[in-house]
Amino acid sequence: MSEHTQLPNLAFIATIFLLLSFTLFGCKQETENSERPEYFFLRPDLEKMYGYTQAVKVDNIIKVGGVISIDENGNPIAKDDYLQQMKNCYASLEKVLEHYGCTFDDVVLENIYTTSMAELQKSASYRHEIYKNHFPTGSWIGIKELGLPEMMIEIELEALIPGK
């Protein structure tokens, strides 16, 4: 093999080595600077019994699992009242957001799961009382049933902690 052939191969190998080094160093830096997840239990006994956490904070992002209209013991509230179930969901979500120093203005994603799209559409204007400055992105998803048969609506959120 001639000397001219070895130089381009050597340059190629050196370039690949440098790219891999930068990539690995960049990943390591991000991992070192990331916070560990912080778990928040809204209803600790209930969540431990069923095996879930209501919210998890990673860096400046809060992910809030689906909230339904239940009391502290997991009993359904407002069984036949869609709008009241919606209001109860938002009241629970507000408690989670407040724990992290957030409001509904910090919500960037909202997914609503419902067993009745018609009822959601009738009650949707209530969301103007929740989102006063802007609406988050998200989806309305019609499903057959939720975790408790009496429930008609479940809401999950993602929010960004301000100033982080």
Image (spheres, grey):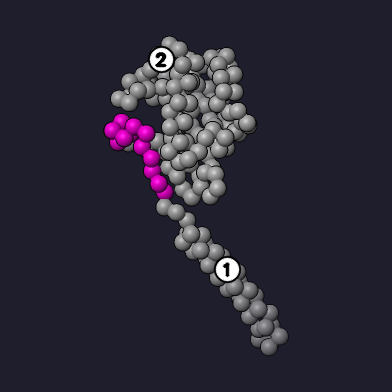
Residue 50 horizontal/vertical position (percent): 31, 32
Label of residue 22 in the image: 1
Front residue (pair 96, 19): 96
Front residue (pair 65, 133): 133
Tag 2's secondary structure? loop
Q: Can residue 146 be seen in the rendering of this structure?
A: no
Residue 153 horizontal/vertical position (percent): 47, 21
Q: Residue furthest bottom?
A: 3
Q: Amino acid at mark 1?
A: Phe
Q: Which residue is mark 2?
A: 78
Left or right: 103 with respect to 72?
A: right
**Residue at coordinates 31% horizontally, 31% vertically from top-left?**
46
**Residue at coordinates 66% horizontally, 86% vertically from top-left?**
1
Based on the displayed image, in which of its 4 quarters is residue 137 positioned? Answer: top right
Is 94 magenta? The answer is no
Local packing at callout 1 (Cα closer than 10 Å; few below 14, some 14-19, many 20+) is few
Front residue (pair 162, 148): 162
Left or right: 40 with respect to 29?
A: left
Query: From the viewer's perspective, is residue 56 above or below residue 36?
Result: above
Q: Residue furthest top?
A: 80
Left or right: 123 with respect to 95?
A: right
Observer-side mark, 2 or 1, equals 2
Mark 1 or mark 2, which is nearer the start of the sequence? 1
Q: CA distance from mark 2 to mark 1?
A: 56 Å
Residue 12 horizontal/vertical position (percent): 65, 75
Based on the displayed image, in which of its 4 quarters is residue 104 positioned? Answer: top right
Residue range in magenta is 37-49
Q: Can residue 123 be seen in the rendering of this structure?
A: yes
**Residue at coordinates 55% horizontally, 70% vertically from top-left?**
21
Is 45 magenta? The answer is yes
